[in-house]
Every structure is written in structure tokens, then in C-alpha cells.
Image (cartoon, rainbow, N blue to C red):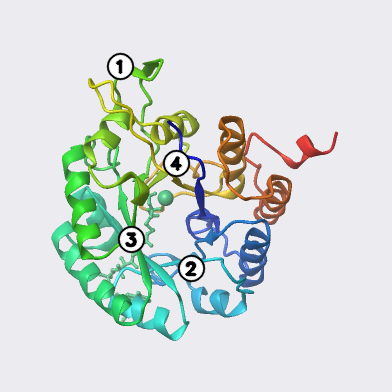
């Protein structure tokens, strides 16, 4: 019951870099985006039009977008928190944006300095402007498995926020396990013996599977297991089987994290997601070897260990 194809939303230029302490040169960001889009990825989330005081690393967002080679058929979404960000996005001819909310009041306050209710009003204004300009809108819901400030998050709250974002006009909703605390539970021949956070969440969120994305951070090395669950999600108790999600957010070399979620490590590495998809016989359209080389490139530029399990050396036998 796995999907036949999966769309990867590569988030490294945004989620991967936003938490880097040292300013990453604009040219490096542009190179990264170009290399990623040359590897066959169809969505490369490129930057954020946010306050440079909140996220200094994204202060060069306009220059980054101006500098990249836009390949036909590749989407380069950018994060937009408010009307001010949307005005900049319009000047840069973006074709897709992402609004980002959360199922946690405390995280919303820390991250975008307002309540959930106020955030949804802001998104509504942003989405209105996007619609008037034929711009696609993706919606993020963060802290779907739990919050670094509030602890437990009721999956019903995730459902509520996700549904509102969908009704406002988001074409896709990405469920963010911001601090990587999802747990996969135990299955036996597709029957869930022990349902844990990831199953419970995906069974509580009632949106069509085709419009859901899984955005897992790998803090406790469980992102791949959680993805297996999200790809083949079942309905608890009932034996009926339902196709899982078919959109996965990931970051080359596993770079990343959110400055407002202390302890959150990088996203699941794109290389490892592709390896999993190949194992399951799911199409993804990405040249894995090329992608591994992009992971080597950015790890070297950032002077960091490459966190992906699969590496370009695996192709040099
Ligand atoms: P605020 O301080 O309430 O905003 O911040 P404000 O409207 O009072 O403005 C304050 C200053 O920011 C002003 O400048 C504005 O002009 C400026 P000043 O007059 O002081 O010089 N400003 C902006 N500048 C550029 N672009 C803008 C913009 N808006 C205001 N769009 C605000 C509210 C939302 C702006 C701020 O908190 C912010 O930018 N937050 C962004 C936080 C962020 O990017 N977090 C990381 C992304 S979320 C994430 O990583 C999770 C995710 O990956 C999913 C997951 O893992 O779960 C998506
Ligand atoms: Mg994230």
C-alpha cells in the first residue's frame, strides 16, 4: 500500500541553513540551489522572506532568488510570514510560497510572535494576495508530535490548524515534527500492534493523503522509521488499508534545524530518503549520486560532518 511515486521537497537551502551561526555566503546558497535543481529534484525551497532580526541567515533572500538559474519545471518556494514578506515575494516573481504556523501556542509566539489565531489571520491576508497573483501556497504546521515549550500536543489541534489552512487555499500541508520526537510504534503485517505518535497523528489528520507532506527532523534517529509509517499509514483498529502520504520534506546531508526549537537537529537526509524509496520500489526522479555530491559540497562549505548514511563513496566501487 505504498504510493508509486513520491515528491521530495528539498528544504536544505532554507531549513538547512537558517540555523547556521556563521553567515553562509550568498554565492554558496545560490550554488547549493542550482546543484540541487540539477539533480532532478522538482521542489527546492530556497529561502525565507522573514525579519532579518529573527533569522539573520536569510537576510540575503532577495539576492539569492535573483542569482539562481530557474530550471523549467522546478519550483522554488520561499517562506512568507506576513504581508511585508509577501510584498517582497511579489517583487521577486516567486511562483510558490509557504506560510508556516503551528499547533502549539507557545511555539507560535516564539517563532512568529503572535497567537495561533492571529497567525491564521495573517496567513489569510497573505494567501489572498497569493491568489490574486496566481501563486501557489503551501502550509506548514509545526510541532505536530510535541512542542519544545508546551510538551504534548493534541493531534486534534494539528487537524484543526491543518484544516483551516487547507480551507484558506493551501494546496499542500506539511506536518512538521520540529523536534524529531515522533515514534513509529510496532506493526505486524500492516496491523498496528502498538500505535505511537506517528500513527496516531496520521490517523487523526483527516485531509486527503495526496495533499499531506511529512516533514521529519532526525533528532533521535527515528525519522526514517517514522517515514515508513507515514508512507504506508493504516487506520488503527480497522484492518482497512489506506495509501500513505506521497510528499516528503528532506534536507541534503541532513543539515538544518529551527532556531526557535532548541535541540532540534537537522531534517532527515535526502540521500537516506532516496535510499528508502529505492528499497521500497517507489519512484522519485532524483539522481542519487549527483545528490550525494551536493551533500559533500555543502558539508565542506559549512565545515560539518555529512549526516547522511548514504554517501557518494557508495557509488565509487
Ligand atoms: P515582529 O517583531 O512581531 O514583526 O516579528 P514586526 O511586524 O513588529 O516587525 C519587526 C521588524 O521586522 C520591523 O523592522 C519589520 O520591518 C521587520 P524594524 O522596523 O524593526 O527595522 N519585518 C520584516 N522584515 C523583512 N521581511 C518580513 C518582515 N516582517 C517584519 N517579512 C515576524 C514577526 C513574523 C516578522 C518574525 O517573528 C519573523 O520573521 N519570524 C520568522 C521566524 C522563522 O523564520 N522561523 C524559522 C522557520 S519555521 C521552521 O523552521 C519550522 C519548519 O521547518 C517546519 C518544522 O520543522 O516544523 C517550517
Ligand atoms: Mg523544519
Residue lying farthest to the bottom in this orientation: 91
Q: Residues within 10 Å of mark 3 (few under 14, many from 20)?
A: some
1 left or right of 311? left
> Total number of numbered labels?
4
Tags 1 and 3 in contact by the CB under 8 Å rule?
no
Q: Which residue is mark 3?
A: 171
Q: Which residue is mark 4?
A: 217
Q: Earlier in the sequence, mark 1 or mark 2?
A: 2
- Can you say whether 253 is above or below 227 in the image? below
Q: Which quadrant contains ligand 1?
A: bottom left
Q: Rounded to the nearest whole Å, what is the CA distance between mark 3 and mark 2?
A: 25 Å
Give the SS element for disc 4: loop
Q: Earlier in the sequence, mark 2 or mark 4?
A: 2
| Front position among marks 1 and 2 | 1
Give the SS element for disc 3: loop
Give the SS element for disc 2: helix
Q: Which residue is mark 2?
A: 58
Q: Rounded to the nearest whole Å, what is the CA distance between mark 2 and mark 4?
A: 20 Å
- Whole-percent x and y of residue 154? 18, 37
Q: Which residue is mark 1?
A: 194
| Front position among marks 3 and 2 | 3
Amino acid at each position: 500500500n505504498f504510493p508509486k511515486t513520491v515528491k521530495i521537497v528539498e528544504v536544505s537551502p532554507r531549513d538547512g541553513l537558517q540555523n547556521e551561526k556563521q553567515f553562509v555566503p550568498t554565492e554558496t546558497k545560490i550554488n547549493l540551489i542550482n546543484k540541487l535543481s540539477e539533480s532532478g529534484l522538482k521542489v527546492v525551497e530556497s529561502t525565507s522572506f522573514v525579519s532579518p532580526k529573527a533569522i539573520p541567515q536569510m537576510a540575503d533572500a532577495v539576492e539569492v532568488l535573483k542569482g539562481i538559474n530557474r530550471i523549467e519545471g522546478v519550483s522554488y518556494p520561499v517562506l512568507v510570514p506576513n504581508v511585508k514578506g509577501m510584498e517582497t515575494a511579489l517583487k521577486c516573481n516567486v511562483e510558490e510560497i509557504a506560510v508556516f504556523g503551528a499547533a502549539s501556542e507557545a511555539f507560535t509566539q516564539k517563532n512568529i510572535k503572535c497567537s495561533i489565531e492571529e497567525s491564521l489571520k495573517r496567513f489569510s491576508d497573505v494567501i489572498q494576495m497569493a491568489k490574486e497573483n496566481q501563486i501557489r501556497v503551501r502550509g506548514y504546521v509545526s510541532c505536530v508530535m510535541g512542542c519544545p515549550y508546551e510538551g504534548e500536543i493534541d493531534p486534534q489541534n494539528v487537524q484543526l490548524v491543518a484544516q483551516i489552512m487547507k480551507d484558506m487555499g493551501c494546496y499542500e500541508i506539511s506536518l512538521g515534527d520540529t523536534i524529531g520526537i515522533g515514534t513509529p510504534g510496532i506493526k505486524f503485517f500492516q496491523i498496528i500492534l502498538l500505535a505511537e505518535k506517528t500513527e496516531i497523528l496520521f490517523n487523526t489528520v483527516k485531509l486527503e493523503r495526496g495533499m499531506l507532506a511529512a516533514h521529519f527532523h532526525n533528532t533521535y534517529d527515528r525519522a526514517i522509521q517514522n517515514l515508513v509509517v507515514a508512507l504506508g499509514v493504516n487506520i488503527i483498529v480497522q484492518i482497512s488499508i489506506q495509501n500513505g502520504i506521497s510528499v516528503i520534506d528532506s534536507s541534503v546531508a541532513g543539515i538544518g534545524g529551527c532556531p526557535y526549537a532548541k535541540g532540534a537537529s537537522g531534517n532527515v537526509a535526502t540521500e537516506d530518503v532516496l535510499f528508502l524509496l529505492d528499497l521500497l520500489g517507489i519512484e522519485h526522479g532524483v539522481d542519487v549520486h549527483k545528490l550525494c555530491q551536493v551533500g559533500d559540497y555543502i558539508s565542506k562549505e559549512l565545515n560539518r560532518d555529512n549526516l547522511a548514511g548514504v554517501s557518494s563513496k557508495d557509488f565509487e566501487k
